[in-house]
Image (cartoon, grey):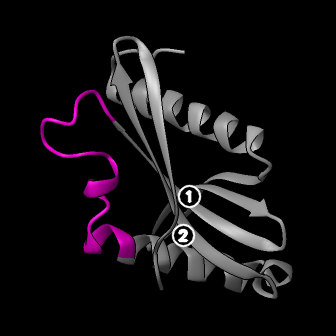
């Protein structure tokens, strides 16, 4: 699937592509677009016994860096804050180990190149 133009549509399609990719790789979807006052998590998934908080980034080109490179410290802090809120409000999930993954998607002549970085950063 190729990502179409338009910021909101592009983001939604990138998240759908990332979700399908992770489902195909054995993860189970818990929630999409978890929002709280401190931030947002694109995908909350389960991988074996762990809760995985996934940030999805799409880039048309890598001219200004990859999608993964755009998950800077400030963005990481917002994701961590949202993950802490999620774990506090979902007590059952709080008992599991958790990690932060990044899915970086780049358009490659109409085909998506997907890079999955597990344990991309630490809380």
Q: Which residue is mark 1?
A: 54
Q: Is residue 100 left or right of residue 113?
A: right
Q: Is residue 95 left or right of residue 103?
A: right
Q: Is residue 32 left or right of residue 59?
A: right
Q: Secondary structure at mark 1?
A: strand
Where residue 1 appears, x then y in whole percent? 55, 15
Does 76 appear above or below 58?
below
Does 27 appear above or below 1?
below
**Span shown in magenta:** 59-76
Does 18 appear above or below 17?
below
N-terminal label among 1 and 2:
1
Q: Nearer the viewer, residue 109 or 39?
A: 109
Query: What residue lies at 80% left-to-right and 78% top-to-bottom?
Result: 93
Where residue 49 appears, x then y in whole percent? 84, 73
Q: Is residue 105 magenta?
A: no
Query: What residue lies at 75% left-to-right and 37% top-to-bottom?
Result: 24
Q: Residue furthest top?
A: 110
Which disc, if any, is residue 100? Answer: 2
Which disc, if any, is residue 90? Answer: none
Q: Secondary structure at mark 2?
A: strand
Does 66 appear above or below 107?
below
Residue 3 appears in view: no
Query: What residue lies at 49% left-to-right and 61% top-to-bottom?
Result: 40
Where residue 111 appears, x then y in whole percent? 45, 16
Labels 1 & 2 near each other (Cβ < 8 A):
yes
The alpha-carbon separation of the residues under discs 1 and 2 comes to: 6 Å
């Amino acid at each position: 699937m190729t990502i179409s133009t338009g910021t909101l549509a592009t983001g939604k399609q990138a998240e759908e592509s990332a979700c399908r990719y992770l489902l195909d790789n054995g993860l189970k979807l818990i929630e999409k677009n978890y929002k709280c006052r401190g931030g947002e998590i694109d995908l909350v998934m389960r991988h074996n016994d762990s809760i995985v908080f996934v940030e999805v980034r799409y880039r048309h080109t890598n001219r200004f860096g990859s999608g993964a490179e755009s998950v800077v410290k400030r963005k990481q802090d917002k994701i961590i804050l949202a993950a802490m809120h999620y774990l506090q409000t979902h007590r059952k999930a709080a008992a599991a180990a958790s990690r932060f993954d990044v899915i970086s998607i780049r358009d490659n002549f109409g085909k998506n190149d997907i890079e999955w970085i597990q344990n991309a950063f630490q809380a």
